[in-house]
């Protein structure tokens, strides 16, 4: 079996460390799915979860861009 309660926390962690791709199983009614129901996100909850993950990804990208700017400044002798 699986545990759909762990899907979003694991996806958040993967997104926060820079994963470029995620795989999800969804279904309109996971509990009545013929297979993998416990691993699935209900389809009506997927959009909201994806929006939260995109916000994390955007934040990571901004932090990475800022860090690159700091490295350039240090490389140029600025502190």
Image (cartoon, rainbow, N blue to C red):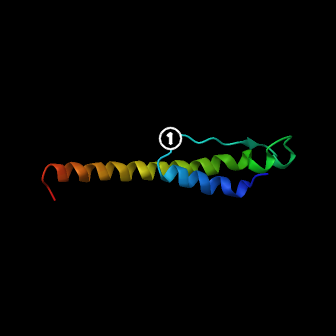
The residue drawn where x is 66% and y is 43% is 24
The residue drawn where x is 74% and y is 48% is 39
Structural crowding at the residue carrying mark 1, measured as other residues with C-alpha within 10 Å and reported as few (<14), some (14–19) or many (≥20): few
Task: Return the residue nearer the eye: 64 or 1.
Answer: 1
* Badge 1 element: loop
Estimate the x, y position of residue 30 in percent, counting from the top left: 80, 47
Left or right for 71, reference 20: left
Residue 10, image quadrant: bottom right
Q: Is residue 7 visible?
A: yes
Q: Which residue is mark 1?
A: 20
The residue drawn where x is 50% and y is 41% is 20
Task: Return the residue nearer the eye: 35 or 54.
Answer: 35
Which residue occupies the extreme left position in the image? 77
Estimate the x, y position of residue 42 in percent, counting from the top left: 75, 48
Left or right for 51, reference 62: right
Q: Is residue 34 above or below residue 6?
A: above
Estimate the x, y position of residue 58 in percent, counting from the top left: 45, 48
Left or right for 49, reference 69: right
Number of callouts: 1
Which residue occupies the extreme front position in the image? 1
Left or right for 47, reference 13: right
Q: Quadrant of the C terminus?
A: bottom left
Estimate the x, y position of residue 15 in percent, counting from the top left: 52, 49
Q: Is residue 70 above or below residue 35?
A: below
The residue drawn where x is 18% and y is 53% is 74
Q: Is residue 52 visible?
A: no
């Amino acid at each position: 079996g699986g545990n759909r309660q762990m899907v979003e926390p694991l996806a958040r962690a993967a997104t926060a460390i820079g994963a470029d791709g995620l795989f999800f199983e969804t279904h309109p009614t996971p509990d009545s799915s013929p297979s993998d129901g416990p691993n699935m996100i209900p389809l009506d909850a997927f959009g909201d979860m994806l929006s939260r993950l995109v916000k994390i990804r955007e934040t990571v990208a901004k932090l990475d861009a800022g860090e690159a700017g700091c490295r350039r400044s240090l490389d140029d002798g600025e502190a």
